[in-house]
Image (cartoon, coloured by chain):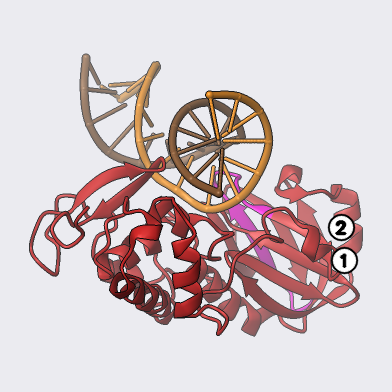
Chain colours: A red, B brown, C orange
Amino acid sequence: MQMPELPEVETVKRTLEKKIKGLTITDVEIDMPKIIRDTTPEDFKKAVTGIKILRLARRGKYLLIYLSGENVLVIHLRMTGRLVYTEASEPVPRHTHLIFHLSDGYQLRFNDVRQFGRVILATNKTLSHIKGFKDLGPEPLEKDFTRDFLRRELKRKRTRIKPLLLDQTFIAGLGNIYVDETLHRARIHPERLACNLSPREIANLYHSICEVLREGIDNRGTSMRDYVDGDGRTGNFQEFLRVYNREGEKCPRCGATIDRIKVGGRSSYYCPVCQKE
DNA sequence: GTGTTGCCCTGCGGGC
DNA sequence: TGCCCGCAGGGCAACA
């Protein structure tokens, strides 16, 4: 029960960058070839061994590791993926599928219980062809994501607000936890039609998206079960969640009982009093 | 364009 | 205690 979303991936990026930027990948162990997409294990190994790590970046829920030369590692942690910088002498945990040996003697380990995570070897040129990555919507914390943009786009959509916010082509980086928290703060029921939101609700929604994500990052992400940052540390934002995973508990704003429904096949936690249909 | 379902996958919790 | 089953969910494909 955990899905690295924008704040978690941003935290992994920040913690890892301090540790691995400037190091060289001296070897790669691939235990689960299917984690790597579109490249054979042999080609992957050949492409990254002896190559220097230049910088890290994030786009939506994707982590990007830029290497010297043209290559970029595009990593999606999906549900249970972890990317941890660790001493080589540490025991290798179960479900460790990929190990990068680094020039400082440490290792960067990719671990994923459910094997949903993906590592794609791309170049600066092929980045724009990667399925899922190429169609990502705007970054919600960047300046091109404005209230006007949100209002304009919502008016065009005859779909329910929750599945829309989860759609990575609409906005990049939101997942189930942060969408539920956002909608609660904005007092919007998850099944409301996007095109029917009032200007005031849209303003609240815009503010809530930015606020929830910033607070998530400030608290180094949410750890329900699996998520840890690049140092292997858990986040703290789970302590500040108001509705997610709190079915049956009291709404911190009005005291009503938090309910859970399925919206678009996803569990959705909300307050039936604060968030009217 | 939008909605629904199923698949990928393992661990966990509930029921018996 | 141990087994079975359903659920959790991001992204994607297939289909309605």
Magenta stretch holds residue A115: yes
Q: Position of residue A33 (x, y in %)?
A: 76, 44
Would residue A83 appear left or right of A178 to someone viewing this image?
right
Contact check, label 2 and label 1, Cβ < 8 Å: yes
The residue tagged with tag 2: helix, strand or loop?
helix
Where residue A4 is drawn, which disc sits there? none
- The answer to which of A60 and A163 lies nearer the viewer is A163
Q: Position of residue B12 (x, y in %)?
A: 35, 41
- The answer to which of A80 and A148 lies nearer the viewer is A148
The residue tagged with tag 1: helix, strand or loop?
loop
Residue visible at 60% across and 46% down in the picture: A116
Say what amino acid the circle numbered 1 marks: Thr
Which residues are drawn in magenta? A103-118
Cα distance, mark 2 to mark 1? 6 Å
Q: Is residue A241 above or below residue B6?
A: below
Magenta stretch holds residue A196: no
- The answer to which of A181 and A39 lies nearer the viewer is A181
Residue wearing tag 2: A45
Would residue A39 appear left or right of B7 to someone viewing this image?
right
Residue wearing tag 1: A49
Q: Is residue A162 above or below residue A123?
A: above
